[in-house]
Each structure stands twice: as C-alpha cells, then as structure tokens.
Image (cartoon, grey):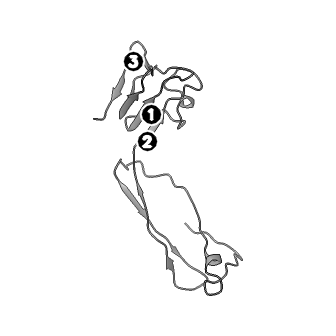
Amino acid sequence: MECLFQDIQLVDSLRNEPASHGFITYRIRPKTNLVVGDVVRNAASIYFDFNAPVKTNTQTTLVVRTTAIWTGAVDSLWDNPGNWNINLVPDAETVVIIPANVPNNPLVNINAACFALRVDKNGVINIGDGNQLDVMGK
C-alpha cells in the first residue's frame, strides 16, 4: 500500500516532538485460511522525502472466536442477521449466548452450528421441526 500526503507539513521532532507524530489506520479483509489461534504480524516502513525508511512497531493480531449474542430485535428467525448483536448469523466457530427477556426467542429454522452455546437462566431456544443445532466445541 502506498499513501502520499502532499504538503503534510509535520513539524520535525527536534522542534516539537509530540507534534511530529502522525498515524494512519486501515482495515483489511483477512485471508480465508486463518483459523482461531493464528497470529498475524504487520509492520511498515515509512519514507519521508528521500530519507532512509523509518520502520514502525510490529502490530500483532490474534485470531479469536467471535461471540454472538441473540437480541431478537427483528423476529425469531435464527438465520436473520438482524437478530444478532454482530449482524451476522453464527457459524461453527462462533460462541453463542441466548439471554433471557428478549423481544423474540430464537427459532432455529435451518440446520445450524455454533462452537459453544450458553443459554442464560430463563433464556429460551426453540429448534424447528426437521432442523438441528450442532454445538461443535468442547
């Protein structure tokens, strides 16, 4: 990736060290072969004018399981992303939490899977006829 900042006018660190700092943030879509527990390391080299590159700190990202909490905000259908706090339907790598006192109790209306399932006290989960929910974890 290359970013050009024309006429950025950062103060040099000898004159004002705090004002000489800058940063850039970005998002990337990870490779699909990453699995839980993988570590992704990333660093960059920054070139100012024609000077030698300045290497940044290495940023480390650990791939973790997603936790999805049922909200039931839209309807009762498990496969409706709008019913989950993450706006995604859980998959076999997702930890699922079903709380009590939601507007709509979940109905598993498709064959579905999750890594782990926690149903809170007084929480309800319904499995539709002919459907199943596989809990894949330990």
* Picture quadrant of residue 13: bottom right
137 lies left or right of 46: left
Q: Residue at x 48, y 33 (%)?
A: 69
Front tag of 2 and 1: 2
SS at mark 2 in the image: strand
- Spot occupied by residue 33 in the image (x, y as percentages of width and height): 37, 49
88 lies left or right of 131: right
Mark 2 in CB contact with mark 1 (< 8 angstroms): yes
**For the residue marked with disc 2, what is the amino acid?**
Thr
- Spot occupied by residue 94 in the image (x, y as percentages of width and height): 40, 37
- Spot occupied by residue 4 in the image (x, y as percentages of width and height): 64, 72
**For the residue marked with disc 1, what is the amino acid?**
Pro
Q: Is residue 108 above or below residue 44?
A: above
**Mark 3 — residue?**
131
Q: CA distance from mark 3 to mark 2?
A: 23 Å
SS at mark 1 in the image: loop
Residue furthest top in the image: 129
Which of marks 1 and 3 precedes in the sequence? 1
Q: CA distance from mark 2 to mark 1?
A: 8 Å
133 lies left or right of 49: left
Q: Is residue 123 above or below residue 10?
A: above
* Picture quadrant of residue 136: top left
Which of marks 1 and 2 precedes in the sequence? 2
**Mark 2 — residue?**
66
Q: CA distance from mark 3 to mark 1?
A: 15 Å
**Mark 1 — residue?**
90
